[in-house]
Image (spheres, grey):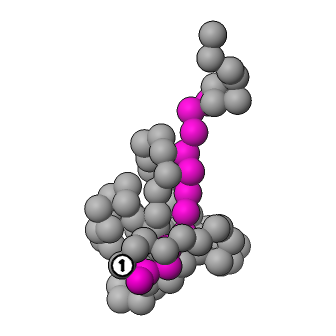
Amino acid sequence: GTFNNWDKNALALTRDPDNKTWRVSTSIPYGKHQYKFVVNGETWVADPNTPKEDDGGGNINSVLIVTPPDYATPAK
């Protein structure tokens, strides 16, 4: 995604023992990011469980918004 310069090799998911859940952990900067999953090293797939957004180049990507922990607290 935009948080790793669309490097399809940067964050490999691993399968949980239940054989149903795939996951990865990483630090992502605050802000709005677009991303997709890469299946079998070639097929780019949007996350079916997130909002989608056109990137302006004809691609529909998933959207992730990362906010700081105190985002809900008004500024003083």
Q: Residue at x 59, y 72 (%)?
A: 52
- Is residue 66 located in the magenta-colored stretch of the structure? yes
Q: Residue at x 46, y 67 (%)?
A: 35
Q: Residue 58 versus residue 29: which sits nearer the camera?
A: 58
Q: Residue 70 versus residue 17: which sits nearer the camera?
A: 70
Q: Residue 22 versus residue 2: which sits nearer the camera?
A: 2
x, y percent for residue 61:
50, 73
Quarter of the rendering occupied by the C terminus: top right
Helix, strand or loop at mark 1 = loop
x, y percent for residue 10:
32, 64
x, y percent for residue 18:
70, 73
Residue 15 seen in the current view: no
Left or right: 30 in relation to 3: right
Q: Which region shows up in magenta?
A: 58-69
Q: Residue at x 68, y 21 (%)?
A: 74
Residue 5 seen in the current view: yes
The amino acid pointed to by label 1 is Gly
Q: Can you say whether 45 is above or below 28 in the image?
A: below
The quadrant where residue 21 appears: bottom right
